[in-house]
Image (cartoon, rainbow, N blue to C red):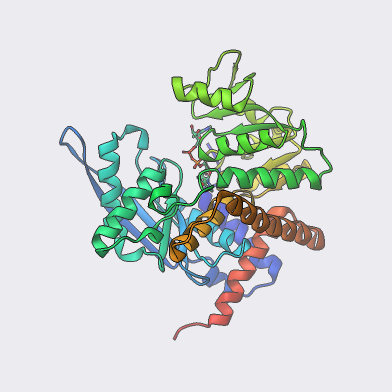
Amino acid sequence: MTTESAFETAQAQLRIAVDQLGLSENDWQTLSTPRRVLEVAVPLRRDNDKVEMYKGYRVQYSTTRGPSKGGVRFHPDIDLEETVALAMLMTWKCALTNLPFGGAKGGIAIDAATLSDRENERLTRRYTSEILPIIGPERDIPAPDVGTDERNMAWMMDTYSVNAGYSVPGVVTGKPIVLGGSLGRNSATGDGVAISTREALRARGINPVGATVAIQGFGKVGYWAAIALENMGLKIVAVSDVHGAVTGFKSVSDLWNHFLKNKNLDAPGTDRLTNEELLHLEVDVLIPAALSDAITGKTAPGIKAKIVVEGANAPTTPEGDAIMNDKGILVVPDILANSGGVIVSYFEWVQDKQNYFWDVEEVKTNLNSIMMKALYEVEAMAKDRKVTWREAAHMLGVSRVAEAHKLRGLYP
Ligand code: NAD
């Protein structure tokens, strides 16, 4: 059991940033309130003809700096509060990386693993049609998140386009390449986590070659982060999925190939650990890349890593954060560390608008330069204001949204 929800965590982080920036009560009111919240009922006809109703959400937290942008999550635990929290984080993340977007999030409270492909398609299309009035390339641009992938984005793009009467690739990002997706999008979040890890190691004076890493979560973020880090010369010593952790594998590619064939992580030579044991390994870097609230008042005291790089959104509660700060652990916060996904989503949106597509080197070079700028700004702000990297990242993101609010003024 955790004591704080993702929503309480996000609100607490915003409160700290507002106070540290010396913003007014009026600023707090506008910054702490989501702009638009939609809850929909999503009926699903199962393959056996049974009809079930699921709750779906789309939260547009902010549109002040541009159209709102954020993922679509299929997970049984999501609710409106968590969706608001994640949409809030997207807002600061887009501002921190200077993307011309506000923040959004959406999803359906369902376990994607229980869906056949046909059920998944029907559910995705019905959800898209329920939120259709408020999405669009100039309004709000969904993307994949936990439990969704490029197939879901293809169905969303098609449903939107059929209703528009023409092809609208820019309505979602994270699409298959042939439908206007971007090269480098699949690996983008993991690549960004790896760039963040490299820079955090530099800041701490640790040589990346041979540095050790444990990764919680072996999905889209965890897997690609592991591959990128291995290519940089780091040693991935343990990874986990929802069923627990393993250590002792030869390489990440070996483990992945075993996983694709057998649907488990028990490759030859591996030993099992619990997810908590993984969090407490003696490593240089710990990367939570699964769900919210992994690092709490209960799990943080046992962490021995020198650096924590948050691949997941909101993986740390304020209690867990305070414990890590007391222990002198350098934490690269989620809105910085996992921003690679939305940065390359931005590139995808730009390419769709221009109908001109970049090669993968251009994507990776531009991703690196946007992330490096944000990382240096956060490091400099943390040093200058004597705050943590998390506080610095929130101060930068929140201050840009507050400034945009002020410049646009209040209508009417
Ligand atoms: P995913 O569904 O591809 O993978 C999630 C992984 O976490 C899976 O390996 C799953 O087995 C594992 N997992 C689930 N519950 C777990 C538990 N209790 N303990 C250990 N492992 C568990 O999802 P993803 O896209 O990799 O997203 C992971 C996190 O990163 C989420 O918080 C998401 O919001 C965030 N994120 C994703 C992206 C992106 O581009 N996909 C971008 C930014 C942030």
Q: Residue at x 44, y 52 (%)?
A: 181
**Left or right position of 379 against 63:** right
Place residue 121 in its image quadrant. Answer: top left
Residue 204 visible in image:
yes
Judge by depth and name the residue closer to the eye, 1 or 183. 183
In the rendered structure, the answer to whether residue 80 lies left or right of residue 55 reads right
Q: Position of residue 208 (x, y in %)?
A: 77, 37
190 w.r.t. 302: above or below: below
Quarter of the rendering occupied by the C terminus: bottom left
Q: Position of residue 310 (x, y in %)?
A: 62, 44
Q: Identify the residue at horizontal 81%, vertical 37% (top origin).
A: 207
Figure quadrant of residue 44 = top left
Q: Where's residue 247, x and y in %?
A: 63, 21
| 34, 146: nearer the viewer | 146
Q: Quadrant of residue 10?
A: bottom right
Residue 311, can we see it? no
Q: Is 284 placed above or below 20 here?
A: above
Q: Position of residue 81 (x, y in %)?
A: 44, 53
Q: 32 or 148: nearer the eye? A: 148
| Residue in view at x 65 percent, y 58 percent | 370
